Amino acid sequence: MYNFDEIIDRRGTNALNTDGFRGYIFHAGPEKVFPYKDEEFVRMWVADMEFGVAPEILDALRERVDRRIFGYTGVYDDEYYNAFSAWCVDHYGWSCKKEELCVSPGIIPALYQLTETLCTKDEAVLINTPAYGYFLHAAEYAGVNVITSPLRKLADGTFEVDFDDFERKCADPRCKLVFWCNPHNPTGRMWTEDELRRAGEIMAKYNLWIVSDEIHCDLIRSGRRHIPMAKVMPDYPKLITCMAPTKTFNLAGLAFSNIIIRDASLRERFIERDKLFGMVNPMSLTAAKAAYERGGAWHTELKAYLDENFAFVKDFLARELPEAVMYIPEATYLAWVDLSRCLPDVADLPDFFANRAGVLLEGGNSLFVGNAEGYIRLNLAMPRSIIKTGLERMRDSIRAHRG
């Protein structure tokens, strides 16, 4: 029903994906040049999709445009909560209370705000590594310390929590807040109920605040079911859950996220510190509500297409680059690939592939906080023909480098 093979030209839209990669990946400006023109790159980096937004959401946006007025807007009725809650019940067998639901322009702004609200300068945030870079940036913004607990790497390419190390780090008297990522970015692990329960017991034992970033919870392999940390810890008051329709439905530029805060005093403080004083973009609210109410069929087909993309990449690497280590993750549309045996002498993999293959990707410790040396992250939320071109270029550049 939906065409995920369509290639959509994003040039001229001020997209981070096409126009902002120099600053984000390479911390450089227009002075940085490559052997490739910008439009010649295969872009497999930032986590938004190359797929068009579901037509049902576009219809809702057009309907809202036809209302012709875009004045100050907030969430003043129950319609959005009802749509989000119904989605949660259907997909996770869980939902939050209406009063717990706050909205934010994004999970990143919420992380920044929560960190500066909950932590003092001599306290610390704990993260599992490799980690989403903005977990570190949120701590840096608030001027607080960072404690890392490396995930344990297994031979098949999967990862697991080192619970002994995790508990030692939770017990650190500086530790005040844990950024828990579920499903995990960049490894794609969907934590099992036993893993969630064990982690939750440790964090509760040391009375820590928990921010559970669950933005990838709907981007899971077909047939799987997400388990919110809030479902495993139904009565723990110091839990904040972050979810968003923007990642699932490719609406990131519309900037709208769900921040679920159980503690009433923190919730009040969060709302007080909202620099937008409760205002939301009317188009963002329209798109988010439509996604949860009308996007189900598109979402189901999206997951099936992503499943096929992962199978394609897994088969390609096994055949063409057998030294690469990759497993098909339970969640996300991001492949976390160990190339340490393919390019043992290359320290900066994003720079190598940009210059030698014309492929933009992310990887390594500088972008993923630590425990990521030799790894790249490939965005697979794009037409399979683009992935094929990107992989072939990467293969050829590795072979040329190795002589």
Image: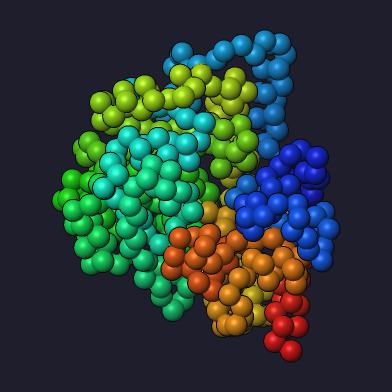
Say which quadrant the C terminus sits in.
Answer: bottom right
Front residue of 298/367: it is: 367
Residue drawn at point x = 58 percent, y = 82 percent: 344
The quarter holding residue 349 reads bottom right
Determine whether, in the image, residue 70 is placed left or right of residue 159: right
Location of residue 351 in the rendering, given as x and y in whole percent from the top left corner: 67, 67
Q: Is residue 272 above or below residue 107?
A: above
Front residue of 117/187: it is: 117
Q: Is residue 320 above or below residue 142?
A: below
Q: Is residue 94 above or below residue 98?
A: below
Give the total number of marks visible in the rendering: 0
Residue drawn at point x = 53 percent, y = 49 percent: 219
Location of residue 72 in the rendering, given as x and y in whole percent from the top left corner: 57, 13
Residue drawn at point x = 25 percent, y = 38 percent: 238
Say which quadrant the N terminus sits in.
Answer: top right
Mark yes or no: residue 239 visible. Answer: no
